[in-house]
Image (spheres, coloured by chain):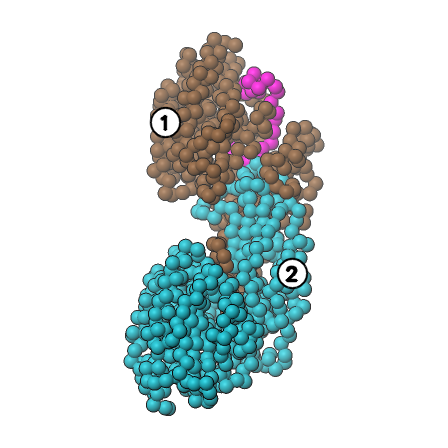
Chain colours: A brown, B cyan
Amino acid sequence: MSDQLSSAIQFAHDERNRFLSELINWLKIPSVSTDPDRQPDMAKTAEQLADKLRLIGCKNVQVFPTPRHPVVFGEILEAGDQAPTVLIYGHYDVQPPEPLAEWKSGAFEPSIRDEWLYARGASDMKGQVMASVFAVESIHRFGKLPVNIKFMIEGEEEIGSPSLTEFMRSHKELLACDVALNPDAGMIAPEIPTIIYSLRGLAYFELRVYGPEHDLHSGLFGGVVHNPAVVLADLISGMHDSEGRITLPGFYDSVRNLTHQERIELARLPLDDKYYLDRTGAPALWGEAGYTSNERVGARPTLDVNGLYSGFTGQGSKTVIPSWAMAKISMRLVPDQDHNDVHKQLLKYLEEKAPKTVRWELIPFSGGPASISDINTPATHALYKAMKAVWGKDPVYKREGGSVPVVADMQEILGIESVLTGFGLPDDCIHAPNEHLQLPVWYQGIDALIHFFMYYGSKS
Amino acid sequence: MSDQLSSAIQFAHDERNRFLSELINWLKIPSVSTDPDRQPDMAKTAEQLADKLRLIGCKNVQVFPTPRHPVVFGEILEAGDQAPTVLIYGHYDVQPPEPLAEWKSGAFEPSIRDEWLYARGASDMKGQVMASVFAVESIHRFGKLPVNIKFMIEGEEEIGSPSLTEFMRSHKELLACDVALNPDAGMIAPEIPTIIYSLRGLAYFELRVYGPEHDLHSGLFGGVVHNPAVVLADLISGMHDSEGRITLPGFYDSVRNLTHQERIELARLPLDDKYYLDRTGAPALWGEAGYTSNERVGARPTLDVNGLYSGFTGQGSKTVIPSWAMAKISMRLVPDQDHNDVHKQLLKYLEEKAPKTVRWELIPFSGGPASISDINTPATHALYKAMKAVWGKDPVYKREGGSVPVVADMQEILGIESVLTGFGLPDDCIHAPNEHLQLPVWYQGIDALIHFFMYYGSKS
């Protein structure tokens, strides 16, 4: 181990309490990008990150405005032209904290219980962003970084990164690099270092069904008007067949089939049905006929209802026929599906199935393509070696079910591959109440990133 | 016209502004029976009514406590043993005002616009209760009432009258009477005086479907767990067949079929499809195959979803698999269905249809039987004559789609028929935002009730 590497690791170990305290401080700002009322908090979160980047020695730190939430940039280009340049991607925005009543401690009042830190964004992904920052800080403390690094931390990931592609297109020179490091993925389990090589895409919609002009008394009108909540249920119910397949016309046409080799590799993952049962607490698993759980999550498209609303949802009873009903519906996509095509497929489905007794409206939200990355690159090899050094075992390669559309966008716009990692775990309750971060794994993650930057630099 | 009748009518006309102002005052109290926080308002509403009954000359005025909300009683027994006794039934509780944002003026800040009074409870049924009170006041001002009257005004109708049957059982002597006057029904249109002779029953449930133990990230777990909102949609969707018939096992077994004569009578009602379209604003009508709209509303059972909730319902997008989903589901019943049987039928349906990938729970709320009343009684004839005197035309007889379980309960417990009337209109938005009362019709209603009490008394 080089002097700089061992010094950096020692420093990172000595500073763990401070790192934790800085993370907690940042988690207290409710950076909910989807909520217009959180605009000032978003700005504050970005500024606080920019200040931190300046403190660790970043140059050219800028908070770039976008139509909604700014992109934070900073760089340390001391390694010279011959050394590789890593673009560290992350996001400082978080999911909405609702339902608030289900949090055991405040979503924005970080709380440590046993070895876990509870707060919205702890795992997804303020914790991951800060792990990268602290890794750079630890190395830089003891001399020049062996790689050039650039931070690009956005504030719109949880709303589909609407400004990022335009930002990348208009700042290609500023962002020029050899590879992106994206710690927005995660590990299979605390003891299994994981490298993600494929991600699913996303298509997200709000479907509204309108019936009568106003809520009606179900006694006076029950029987003559089509209940929009019932129509919505019919439409949702028809989106899957009895085999768990999605029925939108043409939905599977561009789905890339799993190769025999991939199915063998996915079967080797240390993730069995018990793993999924334990982590979800569902009474039983479910899914598309003909595929294993790992295949269903990693390599097959899915359709979920993310929210439902209609009529009276309070305590007790109210005998209305609601005037409208709403569902949030999203699909996880796999190569080579296109979210714009999925939009058209859903429209076609609705045009065919929705009865004339209601009006309907389909509002498209964010969407993004799936991606598969090349795993035979120096950066991936450096990450593999770094993880092995920290965990003492070979990492696994995994196709991930989540969506990080920026990976495909970077391939297209910047012409670079992403190295996907991260130190969150499947049961961190991200996007859910009581999101948490397993601190020992997070500390190991900082160590792994220190190793990664050092190894990747020494290879050049 | 007798002196007392003409004096009473003149008085009622002269006092319209005061009547309106007293009604407005009473409407300002948010007597939402389903909301535990409104307990003090419920008590205040009851006390204010009791005070008014004392003012118009009622004796033995009492506010009887029940496990939830009190029953207000008062009587004027000056007509003598030979005169008939009318039990005036009503309720002072109202539906919840939600969704608040859709009200053009506050639900409990009564507002007059043109000839309508807007407030929760204006039509259903504080306005109807006060119409009865003002009618009695107007007659009593000019001498003894020609009928004995008893008021029984409950505070739990909108939550299914859980205490009223026990109250009636334990106060049979106090409530002894010849007939009940129930102004909780309504008119077909402002110019069509209406007498209701049949009501539908009600069975109301909350169905909860539980999937994973907590909300999950739809990327990490989409494809392996059954989405509870999708399962709920499947279950709801399966409750109707393609003909609009309800599929619960045995649901139609005890439905009394319409006779040929009844179908002819219902076809004569001045309510065509345009009437239902105009009053609902639905794009098209819908319903059980083989029946007309009047039959569907008045004489056939129906199933409606009154509310839906699951997952994320805020603005924008959130990619969760919700841990649970909920629907409020209620059926309107016709003779001779029993709401306890319907509960069993729904349980059986769920046991057969719900997949093992979820848990579910069915919470029964209020329920009550349907009823058909004898229309050949002196009280009904008096009402017929009273309405004809005010509107100048023959009233129509109608089977009503709403539910007033107290009618069947009074038949059973007190051995009396109910005369069903009321001066609300189908487009009053009862149970919905912007509930309103058409004031000219309400004033006519007071006149009609004055005539009714005078005619019914003179027949004895």
Residue A295 at x, y percent in the picture: 65, 36
- Tell me which corner region of the image, top left, top right, bottom left or bottom right, holds residue B16: bottom left
Q: Is residue A394 magenta?
A: yes
Q: Secondary structure at mark 2?
A: helix
Q: Residues within 10 Å of mark 2 (few under 14, many from 20)?
A: some
What amino acid type is highlighted by mark number 1?
Ala
Q: Residue furthest top?
A: A3
Task: Indicate the amino acid at tag 2.
Answer: Gln
Residue position for label 2: B345
Measured in 3D between alpha carbons, the distance from the residue under mark 2 to the one under mark 1, in whole angstroms, is: 62 Å
Q: Which mark is residue A50?
A: 1
Q: Residues within 10 Å of mark 1 (few under 14, many from 20)?
A: many
Q: Are marks 2 and 1 in contact (CB under 8 Å)?
A: no
| Coordinates of residue B72 in the picture (x, y in percent) | 42, 69
* Picture residue at 48% right of the left edge, 60% below the top: B67
Q: Determine whether the residue tagged by mark 1 lies in a helix, strand or loop.
A: helix
A242 relative to B137, above or below: above
